Amino acid sequence: AAGRRSLQYSISEGLPALRHWIADDLTLSGAPRSIDNILITNGAQQGLDMLARLLLEPGREIVVEKPSYLGAMQAFSMRRPTYVGVNMDADGPVIAELDAAFAGGARVAYLAPDFQNPTGRSYTLERRLAVLETARKYGAVILEDAAYSKLSYEGDVLPSLLALDDIGDEQDAGTVIQLGTFSKTLVPALRIGWVCAPRPVIERLVLITQAGNLHVSTINQEVALRAARKLFPDHLDTVRDAYRAKRDTMLAAMDEFMPGTVSYTRPEGGMFIWLTLPENIDSRQLLAQALEDAKVAFVPGQAFFCDHSGRNTARLSFATEKPDRIRDGIERLALLIKRVHNQ
């Protein structure tokens, strides 16, 4: 029956069984929600696009981290909002700046508390609570990107903003809208993500779905559901072990080869390490040389800043390469940085 059903149209909200699985998983993580709070999307990226359509309009302010996920800003920019960047410290967003942004009129904030893309950093528990308190003070909405939250390699697993947003039994309320995905834990090609939000928000997102793509591929939803039921949580342990080894390899190589003029994050999870280069190095120019001379690639950091700052920063990913290639690539990049810095 499931095989035949997967060849037919489905409901726009997504397969009930898959939404049940996601709701149960959220409950296990301390954020009890029902399937009425879940909408299946074509990856978290579609969720960002639909939320932008729902919440933003030309000139409306949205708060983003500095730096922030490039793909989110691409989705938001289609609505031509005004960005309000908030700087980050070791604990998370600077609360005084977040408060000032909301006081200035912003009512939507896009935040990534766990192993952020691009820096790999996470918020402390105290900063998460302060972020929620500040948003509630102004009646603001937080869009929480939880794409990497399952990829924790060490340290305590902290509650998400969604989990800390205690709504009791009231499924129509809440400060936090969370975006999740299977792309980082199962298969990116399935394009299965979800939005968890108060029911009135989900109802409006369903209308956007119906006007756009009707629903996410039924076959892909069935595959994701069966894989999640059969493979989790053991599969997650395998994924974490593989990524942890790659992260450790990259950090060890950076400790060995990078000059003291370069600083970098030491993430406890996720897929990325953030480089801060000497002030005289523009990472966009460095990339051109890296591709030509060292045969290595990275993403220049300027693309992740809403104000186009961060010219001497860069994002490295350890997700796709084998450990021996990671070490070799870091050694080559470090040699290039030393050469460029001394020119």
Image (cartoon, rainbow, N blue to C red):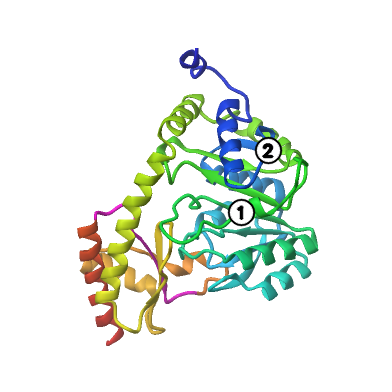
Q: Position of residue 341 (x, y in %)?
A: 30, 84
Badge 2 is on which residue? 37
Q: Local crowd at mark 1 within 10 Å, few (<14), some, or many (≥20)?
A: many
Q: Residue at x 25, y 75 (%)?
A: 256
Q: Is residue 79 visible?
A: no
Give the secondary structure at mark 1: strand
Q: Who comes first in sequence, dot 2 or dot 1?
A: 2
The quadrant the C terminus occupies is bottom left
Q: Which residues are magenta?
A: 310-322
Left or right, 49 with reference to 221: right
Q: Position of residue 297 (x, y in %)?
A: 30, 62
- Residue 274 picture quarter: bottom left
Q: Residue at x 53, y 71 (%)?
A: 308
Residue 144: image tag: 1
Q: Is residue 91 visible?
A: yes
Q: Is residue 317 magenta?
A: yes
- CB of mark 2 within 8 Å of CB of mark 1? no
Q: Amino acid at mark 2?
A: Asn
Q: Residue at x 70, y 61 (%)?
A: 132
Q: Residue at x 63, y 30 (%)?
A: 13
- Residue 322 picture quarter: bottom left
- Residue 113 picture quarter: bottom right
Q: Amino acid at mark 1?
A: Glu
Whether 260 is drawn above or below 270: the answer is: below
Q: Residue furthest bottom?
A: 342
